Amino acid sequence: MSFGHKQEALGLVCAPSDLVSVEGIVDRSGTSFGKGMKVLSPLRRQGMYAVYAFCRTVDDIADGDSGEKNPQQALTAWFDRISDLYEGKTRDALDNVLVAAIERFHLNKKDFDDVIEGMLMDCQGPIVAPDEETLDLYCDRVASAVGRLSVRVFGTPHHEGAVIAYHLGRALQLTNILRDIAEDAKRGRLYLPKELLERFYVPLDPAEAIYARGLDPVCRILAGRARDHFRAADKAMKHCPSSTVRPARLMAASYKVTLEALEKRGWRNPESPLKICPWRRKLALALAFAGV
C-alpha cells in the first residue's frame, strides 16, 4: 500500500476522541449526510464531517436553535474563531478537527467566512423577496461556499471543482427554497426574487404569497434555473475522475428526484405533502454511484 493510500485509510491526524465528538455532531443532526459520506475514505469522510459540523453549528445559531441569547454576535464571533484556526489556535474538538482538515485539504478561509456571512443574512432579519442579485449572493454563501470547501476534501480537480461548486450549490439551494416555501413563510421568510414575484403579481408578504395564483409560474421558472445549474454541474463532473465527484453526483441525484416531485405537485398549494417514490430515489442514487 502506497503512503497516500495508507493515509487515506488512516484518516486525519487527530485525537480519536475529537473525531468521535465531531461525528456525534453529524449524527445528532439527524441528517442523511453521514450515510452519504460513507462512500469516502476515512480521511476524506472525516474532513467532510468537520465541514458539515461547522456548517451545522453556524446554521443552528442563525435559526435560533443553539440557545445563544445574541445569535448575531455569536455568528460574528466565528470570524475570529476561523482566523484563530488558521493560526493553529483551537479551543475544542471541532476546532481540532477543523485545523487538521484545513491543513490536509488546503481549505480556503474565505469560504468559511462566506458561509458565516450567509448565516448572518438570515440572522439579521427574515429575508423577504430579495432582488435577483441578493438571492444569488445568498445561494453562493450558504451553498456554493460549502461546495467549494467540499470539492477540496473530495480531491476534485481545482478548475472543475470550482465550476461544480458554483452550479451544484445554486441548484441545491434553489431546490431547498422551492421545497420549503410554506415552512419558510411560517418564519416570515420568502426567498423568491422580487422581480419574479412582481412580474406575476404575487404579494411580497410571505403569508399571502403562498396562496397567490402567480406563485406556481414563479416557482417553475426557478425550477428551470435549478435544472440548468444541475446540467452545468453534470457537464463539469464528466471531466473529473469518478472517485472525486461521486459524493457530488449522489447529492445531485437525490435533489433532482426532489425537484421532479416538486414540479409534478406544483405550487398551487405548497403546503400539500410532497410525494417521492422511495424506489425512484434509490434507483437514481444507484445510477449516480455507478457514474451513469
Image (cartoon, rainbow, N blue to C red):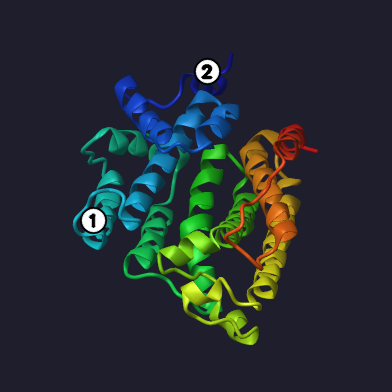
Q: Classify residue 234 as left or right of residue 40.
A: right
Q: Earlier in the sequence, mark 1 or mark 2?
A: 2
**Image quadrant where residue 213 sits:** bottom right
Identify residue for label 2. 6
Residue at image position (54%, 58%) is 180
Of helix, strand and loop, which one carries label 1? helix
- Place of residue 223 in the rendered image (x, y in percent of width and height, measured from the top left): 68, 64
Q: Is residue 179 left or right of residue 120?
A: right
Residue 232 in view in this figure: no
Residue 16, picture quadrant: top left
Q: Position of residue 38 (x, y in %)?
A: 56, 27
Quadrant of the image containing the N terminus: top right
When the figure is inspected, residue 173 is found, relative to residue 66, above or below; the finding is below
From the image, state whether disc 1 or disc 2 is nearer to you: 1
Q: Nearer the viewer, residue 147 or 210?
A: 210
Residue drawn at 52 percent across, 37 percent down = 33
Under mark 1, the amino acid is: Ala
Q: Residues within 10 Å of mark 2 (few under 14, many from 20)?
A: few
Looking at the picture, which amino acid does disc 2 mark?
A: Lys
Q: Is residue 77 left or right of residue 58?
A: left
Callout 2: SS: helix
What residue is disc 1 on? 74
Residue at left offset 26%, top offset 40%: 88
Residue at (54% x, 75% y) in the render: 209
The residue sitting at the right extreme is 292
Question: Which quarter of the rendered picture does the C terminus lie within?
Answer: top right
Residue 8's x, y, as percent? 52, 24
Work out whether 46 lies above or below 203.
Answer: above
Can the viewer see residue 41 in this picture?
yes
Label 1 CA crowd tier, 10 Å (few <14, some 14–19, many 20+): some
